[in-house]
Image (cartoon, grey):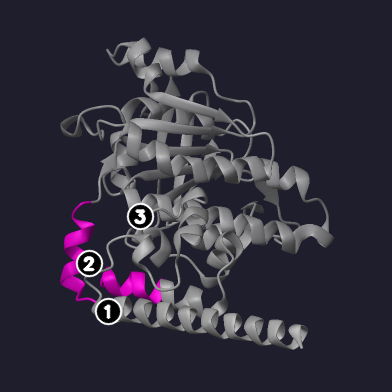
Amino acid sequence: MAKIIEKQVKKEDVKEKEVEEKVEENLNEEKLTSGKQIKDIQDLPGIGPQAAEKLFNANYRTLESVAVASPMELKEVAGLGDGTADKAIKAARDALEMGFESASKIQKRRSTVGKITTGSTSLDELLGGGVETQSITEVYGKMASGKTQWCFQLCVTAQLPKEQGGLNGKILYIDTESSFRPERVSQIAEMRGLDPQKVLKNVFVARAYNADHQMLLTEKADELIKEKNVKLLIVDSLIAQFRAEYIGRGKLAERQQKLNQHMRQLMKLAEAHNISVLVTNQVMSRPDILFGDPTAPVGGNVVGHASKTRLYLRKSKATKRIAKLVDSPNLPDGETVYQITEKGIEDA
């Protein structure tokens, strides 16, 4: 008899708990419909204190970060159910009014795009004013084509005042091949009349030891961008760690999936914080191309679609280099000649 009573009490407790959960769900639904009440991730439907803490630890700290996330991401980091993840994302998007909008609004937002000078007038003209914010710029080429020199150059020019072609900001540099040389950055700064030590203090470098570490550094960059007034994020090189770890056709799909996730992270940072993202990429030779240049960037369509501006760099005579604009949403294809000297990138 006592056992029967105990079972009935347990059943009643379970029912009571289910009722409480239903009430909480209804309250969250009311928050969803009100829209304006949603000001923080804890206000989202289905996001309790524990889920909010998990999201915060995974760098989903704003409504914007949740709004641009996929349901799969939220399920993995916070253990949300399918329906809850969908509702949370929809509520965040509704609160931020992320539906259809007029082209004039987009034009207004595009007016905030900044440009970083390359140091060469002809290169800046090719790029429509310089390396732009809110998107990823990719430079690729063979060894000694000058890819890393672009990184060193922009470490300096990004710190210039806006009237001089800079963004008056700091730089995050993810070094995957141990190729960062502070003495070269110092040399370029000194040749351009800047204080080398001051310039170096504004460049924050992290060495990435594998692909997962590289992706983790990108996640951590979100915090530093806000704290340090960062205007440029550099990844040199994008593909090196992925290419070394995922060898053979059997691991190609897994590599491309991770690479796609990494490019998505970089794109989010560029758009959310209005910063420039510069990535360098390696190349491979395509044996199926019988005529013309068989050189192709590594990473396939995953990198190609995510990079909004793509430049192919080639070595010419002596210090001269050739930059070819391969892809851009708003600029015509073209190429120009420039040179790399002690001062960095200059007109030929």
Q: Which residue is mark 2?
A: 106
Q: Quadrant of the C terminus?
A: top left
Q: Residue at x 69, y 39 (%)?
A: 210
Pick the residue in front: 225 or 237. 225
Alpha carbon distance from label 2 to label 1: 10 Å
Q: Which residues are magenta?
A: 89-112
Residue 215 location (% of width, % of height): 59, 46
Pick the residue in front: 157 or 204. 204
Q: Which amino acid, by three-letter code, is at mark 2? A: Ile
Q: Which residue is mark 1?
A: 100
Residue 271's label in the rendered image is 3
Task: Left or right? Give the position of 106 relative to 252.
Answer: left
Alpha carbon distance from label 3 to label 1: 17 Å
Alpha carbon distance from label 3 to label 2: 13 Å
State the SS at label 2: helix
Q: Which amino acid, by three-letter code, is at mark 1? A: Phe
